[in-house]
Amino acid sequence: MNLQIAMLLGQDGITNGAIYALLALSIILVFTVTRILLIPLGEFVTFGALTMYAFQSGQDSSIVWLLMIMMALDAGLDLKQLVTNGMEARKAQWIGLKLAYAVIMVILVETLPLQEIHMAAQVLLTLMILVPLGPIMYRIFFQPIASAPPLVLLIVSIAVHVAMVGVGLLMFGPEGGRTAPFSAATFQVGNVMLKSQTLWVILVSLFLIVSLFLAFERTLYGKALRATAVNRMGARLMGISPDFAGKATFALAAFIGVASGILIAPITTLYYDSGFIISLKGFVGAIIGGLISYPLAAIGAVAVGLIEAFSMFWASNYKEIIVFTLIIPFLLWRSINSSHVEDEE
Amino acid sequence: MKSRHLVILFVVLVGLAPAVLPTFQVTLLNYIGLYALVVLGLVLLTGVGGMTSFGQAAFVGLGAYTTAYLTATDQLPAWLAWTSGSAWLSLLVGLVLTAVVALTLGALTLRLSGHYLPLGTIAWGISLYYLFGTSHTLGGHSGISGLPPIELFGMPLDKGEEMFYLIWVILLLAMWITQNLLNSREGRAIRALKGGQLMAESMGVNTFRSKIVIFLISALFAALSGWLYAHNQRFINPTPFGLSMGIDYLFMALIGGVANVWGALLGAGILTMAKEWLQDLLPLIFGDKGNYEHIVFGLLIVLIMHKTPGGLWPMLVKLVPARLRQKKKLLPEAGKTEAPKLPQRNLPERGELILEAKDVTRQFGGLVANKEMNLQVHAGEILALIGPNGAGKSTMFNQLSAVDTPTSGEVLFRGASLKGKSSRDVANLGMSRTFQHVKLLPTMTVLENVAIGAHLRGSKGVISSALHLERLEETSLLQEAERQLKRVGLGDYLYEEAGSLALGQQRILEIARALCADPCLLLLDEPAAGLRHKEKQALAELLSKLRSEGMAILLVEHDMDFVMGLVDRIVVMEFGEKIAEGLPEEIQTNPAVLEAYLGGAD
């Protein structure tokens, strides 16, 4: 291996690592606030990528109907709640607004010339269709069992993942897709070509990480979410709604997932079932961070990306084995540090 | 008796199935049997032991690939040549290999708590799957074909109907073994893993060993299923051993009822039949081919988790009329079989020093919770440790029972230092305790809960439990539990669920459990809390009687009436220090104690 290959592999590794870091952060975020391990995060990534691909290749964009159906279910649940708890004009308005949003999205997707509009508009449209699915997912699948034991939450999370993979196949078909890069420019650093998409990925990831950090440190809502993460009951007594906290974190996670999908779609071909392995690599990063520490998780995730890239070169067949065996030493380290007997339900 | 008839009816129906059903249905039943065997392991591991595994499919793969490699490779390396293509020797090799892998993975990951264990199983599940797919010796992604059928008494089992009998005999045996194991001394230790590990450890149960045992058993069941699968199919590739199958196995367990042996069969049956049916039906709805049944399964699991997290088996049981659901009597009729009484420890001489704390100090950072505490408990004596809230009594209790280690000073139990000893060790030495917050297994019967206390007085292991070769010892243990329950006045509640007792009775149950260990020192943490007046009197009588038999008792208590009338000596703590020690009368007039409890007289 010479320096040039090392640079290329490093470039690949850091690009993927940045995506894994974003995913690891949202996994930890969702876990600390809701105790849910968000396995379906990977599906947001693939849905993001494949929706962009559907727009660009002029395929049928039926995904918007998923939004319509889910929104209708959500509105139905809201309505049921309204009927049992007594009517309130403001809440009824809110239901109407949500339904109107879904209808507008359907009209936009069905009427706009999706192949011709600017890429920024495609990105915006993808985000607007997919991100609301996050909070709706929480509302329908997790909110009714928010206080269930962790195992039940994990099982439901896996079940939602399995269902979403099926939905992905239904919406996007078995073929994978790769989208056009954001810009065709390349840069020459020494004797290595840097693709502009790599820079996009790294810059957007950094931007998102920093803004997440600022949002959590500096804003009241961020602090409310952190408070829920530290002590759910305490936060609730202080007037922070756990339902709101759940929906907000799911919205954030969905946003990060979809954004990651859009970012890597020009680099790798994604299929309807690629999401699981991608989010698992985010999990490896999150585990390295002990499911608590954001910086450790980010570093761990970048390390996962690099190890993956370099093992592709040395032992490409064993790439996945190497990455997933990687967490065993970390698990071992955790198990040595927690030798006490624990009672858990 | 009634439920036994149902089981016999079921076995007869299974035996007749291949004679009356078409080949296609028999093939389906074969798959159900193969899946149920894996799910049975998950019932033991997840439902009973509380440990979630997504990696069972990988163990199935280990069993399948071992036999495929050994029976279908033309030129085996010399050191494996002795297997000579025999399916049965390959099974042996497969089970040994699986045991080694399971013990290694178990040792690495079973100490993990919470979510790390399931994530760990996902990780090694994926790793093993990719290993099957990338290894050239194992045929890569196209797999291995040309496996010979299993031969039984020289007869090859190469038809579905013949494999049917082998699969279902093995499955029913595995179910029998599992059921036996759960109703035994080892089984009670396993059932305590979910929500009672602290308690079990202090009763002398090695909880880590119990975890390893069920992990190993579930891995072996999976490998056995893989061996059968490989010889049933006659070819294998990596697909059925991947993570998605691992998830399916867990789904089967959850649909059927993860806490019950029969739930495994039900879950495997429902999922297999539903898959078959949906694969025919869904393309009619969605128009083309695809794995759309996953959408339905995913949503079905969500629904089950929302509505009945315990699975469908408990719902079925509820439909059966109550008289058919009679609780099984664990004990034989009185006077029918006389099991030998358990050997008893020689109690120390009355007045002998049992427990001694020497200058025990415990610091948590800057906080000194116990400062130079000294106390002594003798055989045939009741010592009370009292003090206002926050005085450090609970910390002291933890030092004395080896749950915590003093920063300086030491605790001596019958002359030996407790330094470095675990709560399991002290249980073995003859110290037994109750808990301030009652710790019992609410869904187990009162009798079984108390029998956990006698864990160290039995010695029969997993294998004799699984084959029910330990019935005599088991009866001795249960009769001892019954004796202790009668002694504390709970003789009428033997077969009630422990969680259905009133709080006061649950505290008494804990005392019976502690007595079952045949201790020479009882540590009681607030035994009278939540008891009514009559119950307190009965408890005081019981403790006096134990004292007269030579037992040493230390109790932490708030109820002064109870303490003053009962105990021999009192130690009073405040702010982590001993402020007084003496006879009850002396303590009642001691000015320092009065000030601590009632405030200054100024």
Image (cartoon, helix red, strand yellow):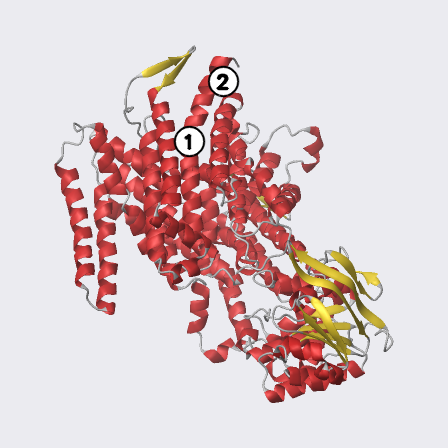
Q: Residues within 10 Å of mark 2 (few under 14, many from 20)?
A: some
User: Residue B339 bears which disc, if any?
Assistant: none
Whether residue B418 is visible to the viewer of this picture, yes or no, is: no
Q: Nearer the viewer, residue B189 or B250?
A: B189
Q: Nearer the viewer, residue A79 or B324?
A: A79
Confirm whether circles 2 and 1 share one chain: yes
Q: Residues within 10 Å of mark 1 (few under 14, many from 20)?
A: many
Count of labels in the image = 2
Chain where mark 2 sits: A
Give the residue furthest to the top.
A191
Against B527, is B403 above or below?
A: above
Chain where mark 1 sits: A
Whether residue A111 is visible to the viewer of this picture, yes or no, is: yes
Percent position (x, y) of residue A91? 20, 60
- Position of B378 with respect to B540 (left or right) is right
How far is disc 2 from disc 1 in space, using C-alphas? 18 Å
- Secondary structure beneath label 1: helix
Residue hosting label 2 = A6
Residue hosting label 1 = A18
Q: Residue at x 86, y 77 (%)?
A: B351
